[in-house]
Amino acid sequence: MDKIIYYQKLIKIGFKQAFALKKVFILRILFMILNNLMLLYAWYLMFLNFPIIHSWTFNDFMFMTGLVILTFSIWPIFFRGIGIHLMRLIENGELDSFLVIPRHVLFNVGCSVCDPSGIGDFITGVLLIFFSGLVSFSNLPLVLCFIFSGICVFLALNILISSLPFFIQNSSDVGERIFFMFFNIAGYPGSIYTGYLKLFFCSLLPIGFISILPVELVHTFSAVTLIYLITASIFFLSFSIFVFSYGLKKYESGNRFNIHH
Amino acid sequence: MTETVIIAEQLTKIFKRKQGFFGKVVKKKAVSDLSFEVKAGEIVAFIGPNGGGKSTTIKMLTSILYPSSGNASVLGFIPWKNREKLVRQIGVIFGQKSQLYYHLSPMDSYCVSAAAYNLSSREAKSRIHELAEQFEIEDCLNLPVKNLSLGQRMRCELIASLLHRPSVLFLDEPTLGLDIEAKHLFRSFLLKQAQKEGTTVFLTSHDVGDIESLCQRILLINHGKLLLDSPLQNLKEKYGAGQVLCVEKKSGKIEEISLQNKEKISELQKILSAQTFSNVFVRSIDLETVIASIYRK
Amino acid sequence: MKPYFLAVLMNMKEQLQSSRGGGVFLIRVIFLCCMIVIFHKFWLVLKAGESSMVIDPVSFLSYLTVGAGLQFSRPEGRVKEIEEEVRTGNIAYQFIRPVHFVLLNFCECLGIYLIRLPVLFCVGAGMIYLLTGSFLPINPIYVPIVFGLLILSACFASLCMVFIGLSALYLYDPLPFFWIVQKCEYVLGGLFFPIIFYPAWFQKVCLMTPFGWTGYGVASLIYDFSFEKAFTVFLHLIVWNALLAGALIILFKMIRKRVCVYG
């Protein structure tokens, strides 16, 4: 209970900090929506030429994009600190001030920053899923399951990447690139991945949990796949937290003087 | 009998640095076989030259770093094993590393800290006002941190670290970058606080003023090894901090005679009666010089 | 001119050092390979759905490789660095140095491109050979010409980044604008599929913006080379570069004035 209150307060203050610069706050939200819609429009033009891409219609693609963007948006809104911010802190040895607070370092750093652009992502994500026509009242719980597993997967990938600097020096820029690479790959219609590539994306590198399996499940439901989806994403998340905690033992504090935030 | 709150036993930390992506590993021993104890209520200065291992030690005691070998216990907890439990009871300030949110008021930051330490908001509020009153910064509590002066900010930081009534306070270079006035204020507040609540203070500083005005005991380390562990008073006496009589001879050579040394007095009489001097003056040797001379050894 | 030349060289060198830019560069190379595999899959899927494909796989892949190579060579971090310098006012310290801030930053970006582009280009060509079994559909003699035009595209992208970074003084948070510019390059430049897939009216829109030329214009030469076309692309790139450079110089003068007045 105490923990929930604490993180709630931390996230609230992150918002407050972001909102202190009102113009930036609004600008980022609006431009992020514009940014997403521009890309969607280009795909729309593409689908005009090829109405069906390996059994996927534009509506399927819209649903997938919405899911990718929505689950991704949880990161900038609530856990923006995980990722490049955390990697820089580790690299520069500035994690100290978080280590002396009696809370889990990972989430403490993660929740302490908020990027309003995520709200723009969130709004686009919700709109896209809603207007994709794939969601009805009856499969809403299913969609919520997808969102849950998507959040777990993105978070897990992010935490794994954020642990890189514990093991390899000067890897923060590399890590940031890798994360956006994953996000980029997840942005292509999932139906183009077949065979081994699909297997790979649905197991070791679970991007397919967001971009391939959900659309398939909406069309042809399979309880086994759904259970696999959820348990595997929870497993990935716990595994990533374990890796981070292991890496934390290797943390080397530095003496650079810097004020965070 | 006062209890021992900090125990370090043969604490060792070796840093492994890898150069680049595929580079080779370089090992560096930052702290080696360091052992000491600190009793409850003591104010201890932990000093040493840059790179001597001070910060590394303090970071191991505050659970930030894992030691390579050795044992430590703070308030009965092993820092790197019981991190959350331990840091609930200690306060830490790293000079120049802010725990406050830059664009928001200190009050906002305190609310989050209070929640981190499980203080109820009523408890937190009364504690904040108590401390703010004592530190004379009640009017700054609701201004954004970016608008505060460095001195005010430092006091706000101190409040953030004292919010949960820590029984041990670790301070790493707390007065770095403060002006003289702010330093004086900071010291007097710290001293008042420590005496009032019986807080144990473990402090590193390059500022001899901090040490002289706050500490009762000095731990001096260099190259990761403990060189000296003595009460401040003993140190002054043993290494002759105090006053020295200087006799400038006609040849231009200056001879220094410590007046605590009885044998030297006859020598002094000899010089004075021979009238071979051109000038006699008294020079005071401060703690800084003493410490510098120990470093050089 | 010497400091600028050195800036180019230094940044080229940094890309090859494993301890500095090398790791990131390696990831970029891997990313490009991944993208080519995805593009290949993409083409196969498109081909399966449409019997009359307007473009063959090698052309499609080599086009996208050039476009993606241009994207993955971009030193995006530079925008944030310049922005921070402007916002914190540290830029004032740059004025006392005897080099021109804009030109220096431009050269630094260019240095990075000069190493990344050819490497990515070669790796891409190798990947395409692995996947399809054929070489790039361009006469090797023309490669240097395409490459020269690519560098011009890179110049435009570098100028764009410096411009957005500097405009931090007026916009406060220029990052959102950078996202949009990036998306424009992506969409209008046809970087994730050739703009020939767009409806005719949208193709015209694309070619009215600089992005149509920096992206599609240059990249399409790889499968459809003619001197005439190359010359048109060249002219467009020169004009757009000149326009942007002019705007940048004016912006920089304004900033200089403002920084000098307000400190």
Image (cartoon, coloured by chain):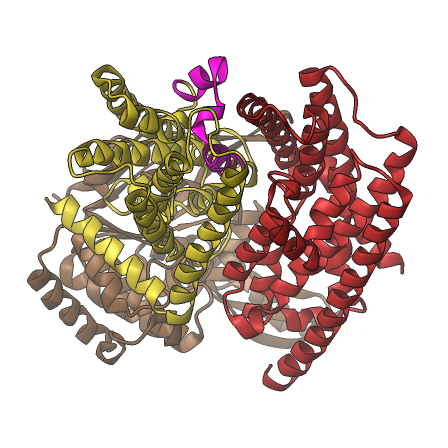
Chain colours: A yellow, B brown, C red
Q: Is residue A42 visible?
A: yes
Q: Report the predominant secondary structure element of the magenta stretch.
A: helix
- Residue furthest to the front in view is C52
In the image, what residue occupies the spot 32% across and 33% down? A150
What x and y, as percent, mark residue B9? 32, 30
Viewport quadrant of the N terminus of chain B:
top left
| Quarter occupied by residue B98 | bottom left
| Quarter occupied by residue B139 | bottom left
B211 or C79, which is in the foreground?
A: C79
**Residue C50 inside the magenta-drawn segment:** no
What x and y, as percent, mark residue C37? 60, 23
Q: Can residue B32 be seen in this view?
A: no
In the image, what residue occupies the spot 50% across and 38% down? A47
**Residue A186 inside the magenta-drawn segment:** yes
In the image, what residue occupies the spot 38% across and 66% down? A26
What x and y, as percent, mark residue B17? 56, 31
The span shown in magenta is A176-203
Seen in the picture, residue A10 relative to A1 is either above or below; the reply is below
What x and y, as percent, mark residue C95? 72, 72
